[in-house]
Amino acid sequence: MNTTTKSGIELLRDPSLNKSTAFSEAEKQALGLVGLVPDVTETEELQLQRVMMQLGQKNTDLERYIYLINLLDHNETLFYRTIMADPARFLPIVYNPTIGEACLKFGHIYRQARGMYLSITRRGKVKEILNNWPQKDIRFICVTDGGRILGLGDLGANGAGIPIGKLQLYTACAGVPPQYLLPMYLDAGTNNEHYLNDPLYLGLRRTRPPTAELFSFVDEFVEAVQEVFPKCCIHFEDWTGADAVRLLQRYRDNYCVYNDDVQGTAGIVLTGMINAAKLKGTKLKDEKYLFLGAGSAAIGLANLLCSALVAQGITLKEAQSRVYMFDINGLLETTRTDLVDFQLPYAHQHAPTRDFVAAIESIQPTTIIGVSTVGGAFTQQVIQSMSRINERPVILALSNPTEHAECTAEQAYTWSKGKAIYAAGVQFAPVHYDGQTFLPGQANNFYIFPAVGMAIFATQAKRVTDEMFIEAGQAVADQVPPELLKQGLLYPLQSNILEAEIQTAARVAKLVFDAGLGRVDRPTDMVSFIRKHVYKPEYADETSAD
Ligand code: NAI
């Protein structure tokens, strides 16, 4: 008896069932496959060798990305087998930084539909459209409107590559089974003239609507998801800063939603701050923070950081007084009239300035955090000023993709004469300086959101709270071995990411149960509970009984 109703060509064309050259003789006989595939039975190991060989013949990471997505379109198991075999090598291809380039060219490299595309012109019919999706038990929708893709700005429909890549990381990094994941692009137009004029652009050819109109479309979407996929968590990704913060505020108390740019980023940066403090022998509350950028990532991080500081025994006001921000119009201070409500807690009394170095000299921060999208914004002068003020300046250059990093690892270590404690949003190679080897970590939220996702999946959590991201940030920090921390590595190695995320997910799951948010029975052993839910990229025996 076969475990699926599909057979023959129909089976081969289903990427979740296709084994390509690995069907056994019994399966070929039972499923009508004789003659439809080469007359061999290969192991997955051998198939992986072929994939690696073919990948080796590609010249650029974008070509490797296209190859891998094509593999996913035909054979999901082999795709995940490939990226999970060597995450350190493949995460930068299926996600940052290659995904940035893939999004810029999305309409040009497009092969086949993946996920869903929901246009604002379909208002009133969203529920009906969601019902078109073949899987009925969806646990995560990752949704963008393409408003602020990575540090690349408004990419409109080209941003559809982001939810696709993000959800692949749920599986590759934390083992969330792929059939429960649905990437979604909400098309409300774009203000990107270049794409509006590109004949191969795949979105609505109109500019973005006023916020109220956009939000009413998102309201309909969120409501429809509750009805069509009642166990679904909605993951908002790469909306513009203000929309990201506002939409999170709008839904977080009544629906199972989170925003990765706001909360996931905050969790992973908190990891870096915790480990930087560990290296310095201080506590988070002893530090003073200056952000370059005051958008969704900055606000999300500052809010989460303040919650973590409050947990260390200071008041919220005291916590906020340790956090300063500097944006495109200069230092956030009380005389500024262009600030929005959620920025106000970080606007302190200070003379106005548009000079970042002058702000550093005056505020004397111990940590600077780049979330500005501006490559090179941490100049030599910035790093030297931080190094004069601090024995170990903490420099977090988080904007991505690579060209948008506020400074490179090499610049941070060289300009600070080896004093900097540094991490970036992208992976830089180790730096040799003055006889020492420094290991720059990657503050990428892929250590956080897949693990939090796995915890939500396994516990069927009703809500997503900030505490879950603080716990995840702490759990990731705890997993960096002391000998690597000494070399400046603030984050765990990517080669062992699945195991790191299982441990993180277990700690978050415990918190979910403690908070009474789980919808399944509380297990006694959290780690083995998580392990039971982990997807393995292995073929099922299609001839075995159901
Ligand atoms: P956003 O668009 O909401 O905010 C950008 C902020 O930078 C704004 O406050 C803006 O005023 C400020 N800014 C722009 N130009 C500036 C200049 N020349 N000088 C000073 N400030 C300037 O963007 P969001 O969501 O906050 O993301 C910012 C960056 O952080 C992006 O590059 C994104 O890729 C990166 N990021 C990194 C993550 C990671 O895990 N490493 C995760 C999420 C975001």
Image: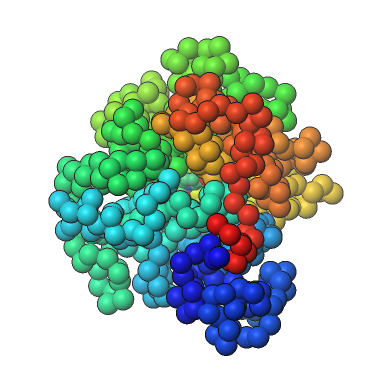
Q: Residue at x 28, y 55 (%)?
A: 131
Q: In the rendered view, would you say 236 is above or below 66?
A: above
| Residue 158 can be seen in this image | yes
Q: In this view, does 197 lie to the left or right of 34?
A: left
Task: Give the image location of residue 537, x and y in percent.
Answer: 62, 59
Residue found farthest to the right: 435
| Residue 307 can be seen in this image | no
Q: Is residue 427 left or right of residue 210?
A: right
Task: Give the image location of residue 466, x and y in percent.
Answer: 46, 28
Q: Residue at x 38, y 20 (%)?
A: 349
The colour scheme applied to this rendered structure is rainbow
> Camera-side residue: 494 or 391?
494
Q: Is residue 298 left or right of residue 440?
A: left
Q: In which quarter of the image is residue 199?
A: bottom left
Q: In the rendered view, would you say 19 is above or below 162?
A: below
In the rendered image, the quadrant that contains the N terminus is bottom right
> Camera-side residue: 227 or 437?
227
Q: Which residue is drawn at 16% across and 58% down?
A: 121
Q: Quadrant of residue 312?
A: top right
Q: Taking the image as four quarters, which one is ligand 1 found in?
A: top left
Q: In which quarter of the image is residue 258?
A: top left
Q: Is residue 8 left or right of residue 247?
A: right
Q: In the rendered view, would you say 60 is above or below 310?
A: below
Q: Which residue is drawn at 31% across and 30% down?
A: 254
Residue found farthest to the bottom: 35
Counting the numbered discs, the total is: 0
